[in-house]
Image (cartoon, grey):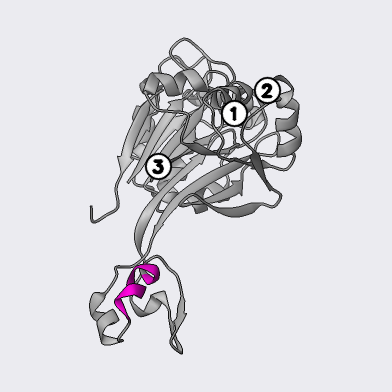
Amino acid sequence: MLDVCLVGTGGMMPLPGRWLTALMTRYNGSSLLIDCGEGTQIAIKEKGWSFKPIDVICFTHYHGDHIGGLPGLLLTMGNADRTEPLTLVGPKGLERVVGALRVIAPELPFPIEYKEITGPEETFELNGYRITAFKVNHNVTCYGYTLEILRQGRFSAENAKALDIPLKYWNPLQKGQTIEADGRIYTPDMVLGPARKGIKVTYTTDTRPTPSITAHAAGSDLLICEGMYGEEDKVEKAKGYKHMTFLEAGRIAREAQPAEMWLTHYSPSLVHPEDYLGKVRKIFPNTWAGKDGKSTELMFEDE
């Protein structure tokens, strides 16, 4: 099971009742955050979730509304006596940008590990997640992210018995380990069936429509997508500032066919995003206006 929470939905500036855009997920005791704008700590507190299990923070880009809350969050983690490493993922320049922000958070009791994205696409395996960063189209270097929880095939005790595999090796093989013992080599494929469907979430903000979004959102259980403007007459403004309208997001979803789409990263002028859902749902019916604290539990298919 993967817990997903849209902790903030605002773009550019926080508003009363709308914090800046950030996503938090929880899986198997580890939490992941995408973006950390001003107010993210408050939004997490309002949700009732904890900072302590956050092991990975991914950044889409380095505009202030997406990273300005990081120093305070680091200080909060440090004040909670955290000692475990924290991994940060983001576009090239990550360590330099975070180093500058840490002028006001210089002393931390835990190490920070940096993973900088340098190409149009890069994949990381971290804490049970497969994280794929893919480049989108904003006025600075910006990435979307797909989070996947992969799921191996079912373990077959019948196969293990038929192949005379000692019982003590069953668990390591089930965990994907290869065993060499007594002159034999035991591999996971000897006892595991075909891979089963996992869980997939795609998240993208601050971008024009791009083929990369459609490709990575294909088959996602949830697409959380940039929706800066609900008004149709703001499409030229969206083009100028490299953002998206609701209708443009709907067309992406229609092509990619995720199970569900949530819109996020609203302009401060967009007071009631739900008022603009009608035409979007004619394009992609299972579209929802994201709001702060909106969450879901994504389950494996056979649970």
* Residue receiving disc 1: 238
Q: Is residue 181 left or right of residue 109?
A: left
At label 1, the amino acid type is Ala
Discs 2, 1 touching: Cβ within 8 Å: no
Q: Nearer the viewer, residue 227 or 280?
A: 227
Q: Residue at x 44, y 83 (%)?
A: 181
Whether residue 124 is in magenta: the answer is no
Residue 302, percent across and down?
23, 56
Earlier residue among tags 3 and 2: 3
Earlier residue among tags 3 and 1: 3
At label 2, the amino acid type is Ala
* Residue receiving disc 3: 29
Q: Residue at x 73, y 43 (%)?
A: 92
Classify 10 Å Cα crowding around label 2: few (below 14), some (14-19), many (20 and above).
Answer: some
* Spatial separation of the CA atoms under disc 3 and disc 2: 26 Å
* Spatial separation of the CA atoms under disc 3 and disc 1: 39 Å
Q: Can residue 140 be spotted in the picture?
A: yes
* Helix, strand or loop status at disc 1: helix
Discs 3, 2 touching: Cβ within 8 Å: no
- Image vertical order of residue 256 relative to residue 193, above or below: above
> Across the whole image, how many numbered discs are drawn on residues?
3
Whether residue 168 is in magenta: the answer is yes
* Residue receiving disc 2: 105
Earlier residue among tags 2 and 1: 2
Q: Residue at x 70, y 38 (%)?
A: 94
Magenta segment main secondary structure: helix
Provide the residue span drawn in magenta.
166-173
Q: Residue at x 65, y 23 (%)?
A: 64
The answer to which image quadrant residue 273 occupies is top left
Q: Nearer the viewer, residue 206 or 34?
A: 34
Query: Disc 3 vs disc 1: which is toward the camera?
Result: 3
Q: Which mark is residue 140?
A: none
